[in-house]
Image (tube, rainbow, N blue to C red):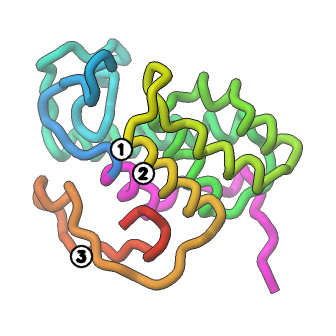
Amino acid sequence: MINPRASIATLVVSAAALVGIAQWEDYTDVATPPVAGDVPTNGFGTTRNPDGSPLKLGDKTTPPRALVRLLEDANEYARAVKRCAPVPMYQHEFDAYVSLTYNIGPAAFCSSTLARRLIYRDYQGACEQILRWDKFKGKPLRGLTRRRQGEYQMCIGASTGRVSWTGPLQSIGLPVGYAWPSGSGWA
């Protein structure tokens, strides 16, 4: 028997989602644009200073501060997902939408066809919409395409098996060997 989707109010960002976001965003201690023409980010894709002001080129962070910001930012984006798509979800769906929102921002998520599909409880259609968000300034980016495929796989619950992962968290001194579900695109 398949468990029913959980009330959106009960869902929180999972540890697996946080590690996945960190893996996709990668760590940098100095604010630089991730791609030419983008806004500067540091840590794990953070675009703002703790006071809310935008990062400037060269602004620095440390691994502990970056991890705190990752959690704060992910929780902020989780609140946006809950506000804009207040429907029951599986944890893996919620995590995929939080990862997407972390990357595209709450305004884009909330005004998207994806959010509207969720409101109408078209869960499969909403997951499929993730794949459309692989462009920057109208051009597909290979890294975004890979990320969206991973988020889509997570969204549809295609995670089976285990693989070892030793991504960017190793570079800041965190334990390695985290096991990502194989076939999810998060490995």
* Spatial CA span between label 2 and label 1: 5 Å
* Spatial CA span between label 1 and label 3: 23 Å
Q: Residue 147 appears at what percent x and percent y?
A: 43, 49
What residue did someone put label 2 on?
146
How many dots with numbers? 3
Q: Residue at x 74, y 33 (%)?
A: 113
> Would you say residue 16 sits in the magenta stretch?
yes
Q: Residue 110 appears at what percent x and percent y?
A: 68, 28
Q: Residue 159 appears at what percent x and percent y?
A: 54, 74
What residue did someone put label 1 on?
143
Q: Are the residues tagged 1 and 3 within 8 Å (C-beta)? A: no
Q: Residue at x 39, y 45 (%)?
A: 71
* Spatial CA span between label 2 and label 3: 21 Å
What residue did someone put label 3 on?
177
Residue 104 is marked as none
Q: Quadrant of the C terminus?
A: bottom left
Q: Specify start and end residues of the magenta stretch as a single range.
A: 1-23
